Image (tube, rainbow, N blue to C red):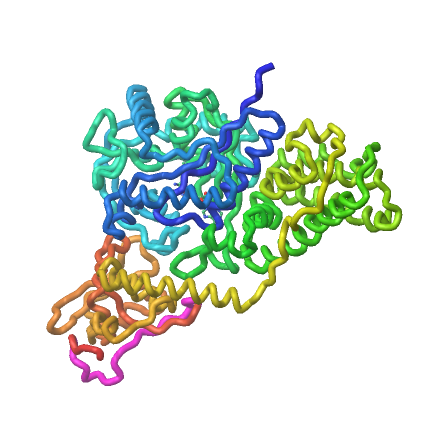
Amino acid sequence: MKTKKFYVTTPIYYPNDIPHVGHAYTTIVADVISRFYRLNGYDVFFLTGTDEHGKKIQEAAEKAGKKPKEFVDELIPKFKDAWKKLNINYDRFIRTTDKDHEKIVQEVLQKVYDKGDIYFGKYEGLYCVACERYYTEKELENGNCPIHKRPAILLKEDSYFFRLSKYQKKLLELYKKNPEFIFPESRRNEVISRVKEGLRDFSISRTSFDWGIKLPFDKKHVCYVWFDALLNYYSATKENGYWPADAHLMAKDIVWFHAVYWPAMLMSAGIKFPKRLLVHGYWTFDKEKISKSRGKIINVDELVSLTKNSDSVRYFLLRDIVFGEDGDFSEKALIDRHNGELVNKLGNLISRVSGLIEKYGLEKCENLLAKKMNIKKFNELIKNYEFDKALNEVFSFIDRCNEYVQHKKIWETKNKKVLYELADSIKIIAILLYPFIPESCEKIAKQFNFKINFKELKTPLKISKIQKGEHLFSPVEYKKEDKQKRDKGLQKGDKENLQKNVNNEKINKQVLIHKIMEGIAEVDFSDWQKIDLRVAQIKEVEEIPNADKLWKLKLDVGELGERTICAGIKQFYKKEELINKKIIYFTNLKPRILKGVESQGMLLAATNSDHTKVILISPIDNNAENGMKIS
Ligand code: MSP
């Protein structure tokens, strides 16, 4: 009989920084799924990797003063180290700079082009570099990207387009015929209703930078990073027969690319599409968005160091949230589960039972205790991605086993048969938990002399010499002060880096101001001296099309002449309230494009924390002359 194949993927991550708890979560889930299917006898291929082309990486490399390839080459070992630390057992780590991938991207581009699904046009739109995508005005929040909360920039390019609009009907058919294609259903419904609203062709090439794969039919253009990246799933398995994928894992941020662009691209190229998209929620950290600039980030080293045990991290992330929903990461919750569930329940069971066996030995018998573990239900829960519930099932059984030890008073009765039931139950527990906490389960298997595979579940445990051995998990104390120290440490590190960057002029002043506001940077006198604040007078107030929060202001800044700025004060001040008003103007910010208008600086205003009140700051004395310096 041919072995059934199972192909699972993670998104390929942007290597512009080291991976954090969010990336770790997706990768651990993929690893759990892949280990589970392997145990069940499937021939599994597990793919992860990095998405290395595009403007985002090019800009990050420039900031670091490096060439893009050199920049990513230095980060890749950090990803591989992180996955090693978390015991991620992937079959290939694909990089979009791998030659075999680049070749396949070009082949597919040519196929789609020959089919007539790629045409040349001009594009102008608002682009978020962090997302690497264009947004419509409607999708932006006050000109800002809804995910990264930073302004989208106006980009104009000659570009090739993919005829996505042509595939609207076919995509809707795909979702209808394959209701399992997008999981969970709520995400599926969102996609369907958006696709029904209509699809716009998307630009698949860039000429404004060159860090990408060249289009085979026009070498002046490089391929759009998402067109390139999505194809990794196909290029990694084109030759080895695993395509199509059984499960693409991802968070909700990138569903659209996977549920719409990706199958349409494959339809056009005549390639089978994947069977399922598994979409999970977003992790926050201490109830805030994971963000490096705010110190709200926890990388893999930090994660593992909390309990000095990678299995605790794997267990916690899968046990603590319902797959598909958002979750909040807290160090305390991780440590609580480590102590309460892994140390006190599982660890305790293993050490008590092995200690008793060492003393009294085993005698084979039917394992009636095992009937309390519903293995069928456990398997179904995993196949339905209900990892928290599946773990709960096993831990209820662990509770039963601990109660059994207590109830049967083995230390008095010295009953070898009861000990056999317990040892055989420990075998079942370790095999079931193996996908989640592989390192600990391997230790248990060694101690109790069995192999980890699903056949062993039904094979009674062989009698052998079992010794107590070391504790599987050590308790960890949660100290609030440690967390505070770590948070401070993080910020301290950030401050030092920031200072270095400011000194090296790698960071612009606007970023510095934001950091100062966020409390990450301390300002010393030399920083303060870099900031040029002046008295200015508002001379003209103009509307900006489609901007309901911004006024375009012409300022008279005395000796500096006339300046234009966009100010987010439209909801707070009427035109006539502003004309001729004297304000304080921050002159030497790097200009920014807002709603297509170049804003040459900022004005100063007082605001409350939720920005519902904004009050302009002006010189008390109207004799202040335009252009006077604030010092
Ligand atoms: N390079 C693209 C993916 C291309 S796949 C063909 C990309 N990269 S990313 O580095 O931004 O990774 C996004 C993915 O990382 C999410 O879909 C999710 O898997 C994971 N996560 C990143 N932050 C996360 C959270 N805060 N919470 C949960 N998962 C998160 O997008």
State which quadrant residue 114 falls in: top left
Q: Residue furthest top?
A: 1
The reply to whether residue 117 is visible in this rendering is: no
State which quadrant residue 520 falls in: bottom left
Front position in the image: 232 or 341: 341
In the rendered view of the protein, which quadrant contains the N terminus?
Answer: top right
Front position in the image: 498 or 132: 498
Asked whether residue 622 is drawn in magenta, I would say yes
State which quadrant residue 68 falls in: top left
Taking the spot 40% from the left edge, 57% from the top edge, the residue there is: 292
Taking the spot 47% from the left edge, 50% from the top edge, the residue there is: 300
Percent coordinates x, y for residue 72 in the rendering: 32, 43
Instruction: State which image quarter holds ligand 1.
Output: top left
The span shown in magenta is: 610-626
Percent coordinates x, y for residue 554 in the rendering: 19, 65
Whether residue 152 sits left or right of residue 290 in the image: it is left
Q: Image height check: is 49 above or below 571?
A: above
Asked whether residue 362 is drawn in magenta, I would say no
Front position in the image: 630 or 99: 99
